[in-house]
Image: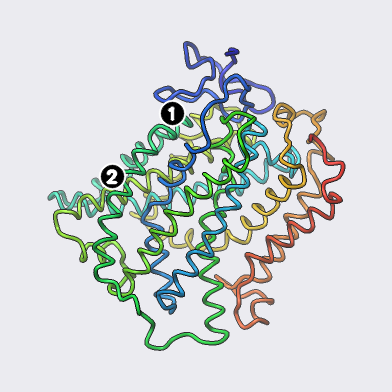
Amino acid sequence: MASTIPDPLPGGHTALGATGPAATGADHAGRIEAHGIDHIPDGERHGHPRELFSVWAAANVNYLSLVIGGALVLMGLSLWQAVAVIVVGNLFWVVTGVLAISGPASGTPSEVITRALYGVIGNRVNNAVTGWMISVCYFALNLSAAATAAFALVEKVGIPANTGVQVAVVVVIAALTLTISVYGHATILRLYLPITLALVAVFAFVAVAVLGHTDFSYAPAEPLTGSELWVTLISGVTLIAAGPLSYTTSADFSRYLPRTTSAKAVAGWTALGAFLPSVSVCSLGAFAATTVDMTDPQTALEGLLPGWFTPAFLLALVLGTISINAMTAYSAGLALQAVGLRIRRSVSVLFDGTAAVALTLYALLVSNFLDTVSDVLQLTVVLLGPAMALYATDIVLRRNRYDGLALTDESPDSPFWYTGGVHRAGALALVTGVTSAALCVNTLYTGPVAHALGGADLALPVGMIVSSAVYAGLTRGGRGMRGV
């Protein structure tokens, strides 16, 4: 195995001070990952694509999925309409799987691969917004949800959840999350299989309790019909699809696989690992909504569970959130490096976590800031839909052929410098797609297209189709693309 200097940084700079076995750059559980956004040499590639299943499963057996499933019934859908929406919305995990195949092909994370789409400088802007800012907001939202469950847990053991205890709980959960993120890729692979098994066991018990009370013939007293039904169905699919669309960084977790790894296997295990648990847990939330009030899912579900099991349920909610946030923080750390900050990946992860903890504490103790953040994140589909479609289109047009070493070159001589550091085709396609989606949205505001269609929110399909079509047209269907 060739020896490498650890954690090379943007612009060819390297992190200093690393010595010992970890300095070889090898990815081993129990050691802090040495690599950042640099290229993974073939000699350090290892693993099997089936390992990706537990990585994505652990992140999708979570509280948020229960909440979203219950929300669909609260929106006025019947049980089986809600289940249909859950299945259709989660099919977008297939796109997440497609993006993952670029990891083994290039040996670099998504944050670097997207230089091929936007150019070296243009990609820094992309990573600052879609890679870092949105990730930190999601981290804060998930941390807030985990903290709420943990507050209930400490109160059950007789500890009052006063301000000091709340701060301590948030910090402890964040510390556990960031420890996994700092240790990195190998630790995630090692831990997420047992985490998946533990979460599945707990949620299987919850499922038995919920299914025993489910009204399988449930329909609202006043069923939705006509255009109102279609508007709600489309909104529901968009709500579900926001989950897979938030993972435009799936190559981060597949880049250590050997270059010769089957692309179908990488895409399949990634998509399946996320799709199955997400459909199951979301459906469980919908089933529960037929019998209890899911406006407060945690309290409602506790009412269906035996008292002795409640602490295990609350712990599972916290553990699931730690799993999803560890992946979020890991990618956010890489994004911060890709923006141009010359710091170690481990340091960038801690920076991201500090920002997320600050947002969470401010929200829980000072104001309803996260309510505003949550509303804003409902609009992320306007940006993330076109960005994901553009990335997938580039993979298809290039036939998944990426020169990983060339992608790490940030100099004006790089084949991905394009014009002034910006790939105009990618930038224009993204702007056009986002603009088209914004005209169709019906979330915090009603765009003119949505208004003309009676409130139907077509932001998701329109944004993705327009960005993909514009990019393919401007690159002449991929002919002559650089860096292939």
Q: Position of residue 238 (x, y in %)?
A: 55, 66
In the rendered image, the vertical position of residue 52 relative to residue 184, given as above or below:
below
Q: Position of residue 76 (x, y in %)?
A: 43, 79
Q: Position of residue 189 (x, y in %)?
A: 44, 34
Image quadrant containing the C terminus: top right
Residue at (40% x, 75% y) in the render: 79
Question: Circle 1 sits in a helix, a strand or a loop, which is it?
Answer: helix
Which amino acid lies under the numbered mark 1 shown in the image of this protein? Tyr
In the rendered image, the vertical position of residue 284 relative to residue 138, given as above or below:
below
Q: Which residue is mark 2?
A: 169
Q: Does the CB distance between marks 1 and 2 fall below 8 Å?
A: no
Which amino acid lies under the numbered mark 2 shown in the image of this protein? Val
Distance Cα–Cα, label 1 vs label 2: 22 Å
Q: Residue 245 sits in which quadrant?
A: bottom right
Residue at (14% x, 58% y) in the render: 307
In the rendered image, the vertical position of residue 327 relative to residue 71, given as above or below:
above
